[in-house]
Amino acid sequence: MTRWPQLTSFAWPRDANISAVKMRLMGEEPDKVPKDPHQIDRIEALLVDCHNEWEQLAALEAYLEEQLDFPFQAVCDVAPVPGSYGIAQGDHVKVLAFLDSDQRWGVMMRVQKGQRFYRCPLFRLKPKKLTPPQMTAVDDYRTWFLAVGLPEIVEFDE
């Protein structure tokens, strides 16, 4: 079960609506056709009743839980934050399970690299050899996370 943070205030660095996803898919060229022309419609349908990024994350997490079967192979195709350890860009891992979502990194996965186990954000993983619906679900999540993502959390000292 996902535990959501108890927060006193948010800073909203990115737009919470689907227009950010549309802009990411279309890039600088509004007339450009995305590689999956139905992706925007799928994401809009999933997020239609969501009021903020936290609700969007919960909806996308439920979508992923319905679609994904474990274990599966993946490659890390997004560089880690400087100073982090474990999974580097280009590493091949076995994805074993969902973990609790993270306030900063969204959907977290339990992965195995060699004999070691790590936590890794799903947006950093590109799955290999999944069924088309499973690949679509992961691609939809990654697109949303990289376009919209989660709000920066601002905590006040009391």
Image (cartoon, rainbow, N blue to C red):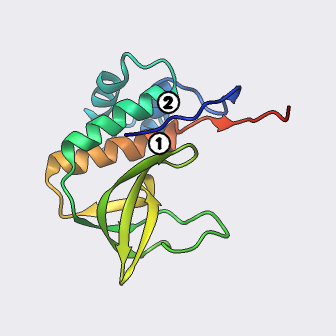
Q: Residue 100, percent across and down? A: 43, 48
Tally the marks: 2
Q: Residue 69, percent across and down? A: 18, 54
Left or right for 62, reference 25? left
At a point 35% along the width and 35% down the height, the residue shown is: 60
- Classify residue 154 by image quadrant: top right
Q: Which residue is mark 1?
A: 145
Q: Which residue is mark 2?
A: 54
Please identify the residue farthest to the bottom as the structure is shown.
115
Q: Amino acid at mark 1?
A: Phe
> Is residue 36 among what the camera can see?
no
Q: Is residue 78 above or below residue 51?
A: below
Of 29 and 35, nearer the camera is 35
Alpha carbon separation for disc pair 2 and 1: 11 Å
At a point 43% along the width and 36% down the height, the residue shown is: 26
Question: Quick one: label 1, few (<14), some, or many (20+) residues within 10 Å?
Answer: many
Of mark 2 and mark 1, the one earlier in the sequence is 2
At a point 23% along the width and 51% down the height, the residue shown is: 135
Q: Residue 88, percent across and down? A: 50, 73
Q: Secondary structure at mark 2?
A: helix
Quadrant of the frame with the N terminus: top left
Left or right for 109, reference 146? left
- Classify residue 31 by image quadrant: top left
Q: Amino acid at mark 2?
A: Trp
- Which mark is drawn over residue 91? none
> Is residue 64 among what the camera can see?
yes
Please identify the residue farthest to the left as the structure is shown.
131
Q: Secondary structure at mark 1?
A: helix
Left or right for 109, reference 73? right
Q: Is residue 113 above or below residue 138?
A: below
Quadrant of the frame with the C terminus: top right
